[in-house]
Image (spheres, rainbow, N blue to C red):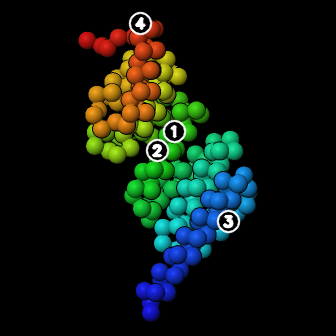
Amino acid sequence: AWEYYTEQQLAGYGDRFMSAIELSGQGQHEEAVKALEELAADGGGRYPELARLRIAGEMAARGDKAEALKAYDAIAGDGAALPALREVARLQAGLLAVDIEEFAAVESRLSSLAAAGNPLRHSAREALAVSAMKAGEDQTALDWLNRIVEDSEAAGGVQNRARLLLDYLAGKGVKAAG
């Protein structure tokens, strides 16, 4: 009986989460955020964490990058959150930081995610390369981009974007050190 009750509770939280996503998809962002905030406050399982991630995404989508960054940082620093969700929050924060922080800050946020074997490494490396280019650190960008194209596990889209940026850097005369 207890398992059935628990399953029903979690199914209800899942339904609420999906309803909020549908609201967002219909352009009803304020209503979606309100529903997500309620789920974050009184939901069960991992739904409060998922709701918090989605709220941060809604903030970023409406252009409130600084607040979204704070929200992602809060999730990333929440020791009670699922480690995979904390890493996703760290990546999302790093991606936002490319637009609003200096390269050193972005590097601090993303370098551990860019490590070999991390499943988020390709996105982290791409963001590090773009941030380095914005900072005028073309050699550093070249290094990050080369790590993407040399990684056989990198998805085709990421590899294609990396190659385009490498071509751009080559056009500027940037060459591998050594």
Query: Callout 2: helix, strand or loop?
Result: helix
Q: Are marks 1 and 4 in contact (CB under 8 Å)?
A: no
Crowd tier of the residue under label 4, counting other residues whose Cα lies within 10 Å: few below 14, some 14–19, many 20 or above: few
Q: Residue 173 got which mark?
A: 4
Please give the name of the residue rendered at 43% of the width and 86% of the height, measured from the top-left corner: 3
Q: Count all numbered tags in the image, as a single digit.
A: 4
Crowd tier of the residue under label 2, counting other residues whose Cα lies within 10 Å: few below 14, some 14–19, many 20 or above: many
Task: Indicate the position of residue 87 as horizontal and vertical percent values.
Answer: 42, 51
Task: Indicate the position of residue 58 as horizontal and vertical percent values.
Answer: 64, 51
Q: Residue 91 got which mark?
A: 2
Q: Nearer the viewer, mark 2 or mark 3?
A: 3
- Dot 4 amino acid type: Gly
- The residue lying toward the viewer, choosing from 104 and 37, is 37
- Dot 1 amino acid type: Leu
**Residue at which label 1 appears:** 95
89 is higher (above) or lower (below) than 146: below
CA–CA distance in space, label 2 to label 4: 31 Å
Please give the name of the residue rendered at 30% of the width and 38% of the height, measured from the top-left corner: 153
The residue lying furthest to the left in this view is 178
Which comes sooner in the sequence, label 3 or label 1? 3
Quarter of the image for residue 12 reads: bottom right
Crowd tier of the residue under label 3, counting other residues whose Cα lies within 10 Å: few below 14, some 14–19, many 20 or above: many
Please give the name of the residue rendered at 49% of the width and 17% of the height, measured from the top-left corner: 136
Task: Indicate the position of residue 142 as horizontal and vertical percent values.
Answer: 38, 20
Query: Callout 4: helix, strand or loop?
Result: loop
Quarter of the image for residue 35 reads: bottom right
Which comes sooner in the sequence, label 3 or label 4? 3
- The residue lying toward the viewer, choosing from 164 and 124, is 164
**Residue at which label 3 appears:** 35
